[in-house]
Each structure stands twice: as C-alpha cells, then as structure tokens.
Image (tube, rainbow, N blue to C red):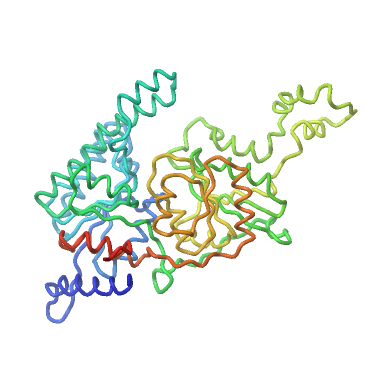
Amino acid sequence: MVNLLFVALEFKLCSQAKADKIKDGVIFLQKLAIISTYDDLCGIAGYTKALVRQLQQDYDVTVFDLDQYLLRSTIRSIRRLGDELIAEIVSKLPAFDVVNIQLEHGTLGATPADIFRRFESLVRHGKPLTVTFHTVLPVGGRGARDLARAVRHLDRRGFFEILHEMRVGRELGHPVMRSLARRQKRAKTSVIFHTRRDARSHKLIYGLDRVFDHPLAFYGSTGKLMPPRTRVNLPAALKAEVRPVVLGIFGFISPYKGIHTAIQALRRLPGNYHLMVFGGLHPNDIRKGYSVHPYLEKVMDLVTDDFGAMAASKKKGVFEGQVNLHIDSSATLQRLMSGMCDISQRVHFMGAVRDDEFASAIQLCDIVVLPYEEVGQSSSGPLAIANDVGARIVCARNKAFLQYERYNPGRLNFFDIGNYLELAQRIISVAESPPPGLPQSYTVETNRAVYKASFEMPSDSIEPFIRKLAGKDD
C-alpha cells in the first residue's frame, strides 16, 4: 500500500512540476537551496549530506554551509562577519525555486538574539520554504507554578532547569514558531518534525497549516542510497578474542550519551563482551587549559577503576581491619584496594568517525547500545543509521527513542535510563536471540516523498497524505 502510494505521489508531483520545466526536450530540475551546517563534524551535517543524495534526483541542490566559527562567536567583529555570511546567503536565495533550512537553533548563533535575528533574515524571502526542526524547544511546558513548586521543595537543579526552559521558550522557541505562523499567510511555508508528538503539538498551538513528520533516514538498500563500505580496523585485543560479542556506542563523548552506564553494564557481562566507543569530544568541548576533559576523565577512571595512589588511599579505610596480609609490592596493594577491576582490554576508544565510516562502524557491532539520557532532543542520527542498516539495538527509554519506535515498532529493545543492571540483562537477551527481521515502514524513499510534498503538494492534500503514510488510510 505504501509503495503504491509513493508511486502515485511521484507521478502526481513530478508530472505537474516537470511539465513546466521542459524546454526543447530537456528537463530542467527545480533549484533547491539547503541551508545547513555541512563541512563540520556534526550530526546535522551528516544528515544533510544524506538528504542531498536522496533529493538530487528530483532537484538541482545547492547547500549553503553555516560556518560555525563565524556564527557561534561572541566576539563583536566575528559576529559581524557571521551576519555578513547570512546576508550573503539571503542575497542568493531569489535565484532558487524552493528553500530548506535544517534548523538546529545553536548553529545560527551563540545567543537567542543572534539566532532569531538571523533566522528572520533567512525566512524573509517569498520562495516556498520548508524548515526541518532537529531540536524542538519547550512549548506549553513548565511555567511559574512549577518554578514555585521547585522553590518549596528546595529543588535547586529543577528550579534552574525550569527557569532555563521558560527563558529559551520566551526568547527563542515562541518567536521562531510565531514567525513561521506569520509567514504562512504570505508564502508557502512547511515544517518537518521528527516525531508525531511534536508535529501535532506545534500544529495545534501555533495554527501551522503545512506540518509533516518523518524520522531521520540516511540509507536505503539499493543503488546510490546504500551505505558506503569503508574499512574500519578492529583493535588487536578484539581480534585475539575467540568468540567476541561486540557492543558499539556512537556519538560525541558527553555526559548525556550515557557512556558510563554502558561501562557499568560491561562489568556485569562475560569476559568475551567488548565495548567499542566510536566518537570523540565535541569541538565545542575542546577548551584551553584542560589537560583532559572532566567527563572523559570520569569515563577513563570508570574503565580502570582508578588504580591511582589517591584512589587507593580513599579505599584504604574499607579494607582496614578486614584483611591481614603482608604485601611488599605497593602496586599489588593498590590493585587489591581498587578491586582488580581494570577492563581497559575490553573497552576500545575508536575515535571520531567520518560520515562515510559511520554505517560500516555500526555493521562491525553485534549490538548497538544507545544509553542516552533525556535531554529534550527529538531525534538521533546513530539510532536512525543503525536502524537503516538493520542492526540490533538496545537503547534507553527516553522520549525521543520512544517516539522513534512508533515509526518502526518492534525494532528497538529498551531499558530504563541509567539502569546498567537492566542494560546488561537486555544485552545478553538480545545477543542470544536472532535478529527480528521486521520490515521498515519509514525509509529514505518515504523521507524523499515527504520533502517533495512539503515543497510541492497543495495544502488540502497534506492530511490524507500523512494518514496514508502512517497506514491509516480509511
């Protein structure tokens, strides 16, 4: 049913669009401008590259790269250069037929004022516009009552989280959405969200007319949309293992990625289980004056259980009066005091991977582990790529992953955020079971169709299109 739908959609949209683009027997594709990060090592850039591959058969695609050095600087002279970059992009948009903005708010600036001002400049033209939201800022969430409740309960962390949400919503979230609501009255304006929840809530709250939803999709199973095959070398310790079970964790090394949860789970798995960490520090976390990033140091200590003298002295009190041994070697004593729990031969830091290496790295793993904490994100590139290539996935039960599972039911295996005992149990269960082999309902082809519909489809046809896509055609 879905395949027939998109054959029909392809014919309906293309026959109408291409009828006006044939001259002397030659078909001229509409010109599409995509505004996004592109050259940086980040998830948005990786998705944009995948999207270009999907759409270049239908459009003449040009990507305008958002230079993060210029746009995220707080130095006045460099901020001015960032404004000039945006002005240059705006000056070129009249030459295009349709425009798409891959919106991660922080890629447009370091302050809400800079971000909104630049966003307003990019949407001021009259061309058909589609904005893809990679992060959805809080809408209709916590407010003054919640703030007062946090004060009554002496919840300092909760107080500042709510205060931040209210400020971001007031200074950035609401202004951006209201700007799009105003724009749709004068020009074709579409939005794409990565969850049905976000699509529905924003359509109701802001009265948006052209609202689509589709999960991230990177790779297909045939032709040019297949994932590239690149060589990723395995660690020597892993090659020496007789029957290794390889776990992979992906993305920048930061606290919300839950790497510490994966390591705690690995300690409770058999010795033939290995964890490969594909990723490095985010460029914004590389700071002057740090010999090692605090979170990375915490992760390394967890792997080695910190055999240092300082850690051993802290644990000395636990052993006093319980152990009566004479040990001449201080090194041996330190290992005893720290529990002899060094698992550095089973944890392998593979470094940051390029976009063209990501899929190959995932395919090296028996199980992809995504123990991400809840931080309000609406999508995950590693999850989408792992699903595209048919990997077995164990992931935390956060809101983004629960929403993704609604598009591809039965393909994810959940555990509660931070529960490393449940994670270890779930990994063993998945490792001992065959892959489910379930069909994938949302693919690069349906993603391509959604983008084409956002540019070309009449507004009164969108609701039936969305219902058919969700399998609710009645």
Q: Residue at 71% of width from left, 61% of height from top? A: 243
| Residue 42 in the image, given as x and y percentages of width and height | 41, 49
Taking the view exactly as shown, the residue that stands out farthest to the front is 474
Left or right of residue 108: residue 256: right
| Residue 222 in the image, given as x and y percentages of width and height | 42, 73
Question: 178 or 332: nearer the eye?
Answer: 178
What quarter of the picture does the N terminus occupy? bottom left
Q: Is residue 448 visible?
A: yes
Relative height, residue 329 to residue 279 (above, below): above
Q: Is residue 52 visible?
A: no
- Choose top left, top right, bottom left or bottom right for residue 238: bottom right
| Residue 444 in the image, given as x and y percentages of width and height | 36, 65
Left or right of residue 386: residue 75: left
Q: Residue at 11% of width from left, 72% of height from top? A: 20
Question: 182 or 329: nearer the eye?
Answer: 182
What quarter of the picture does the C terminus occupy? bottom left
Left or right of residue 286: residue 320: right
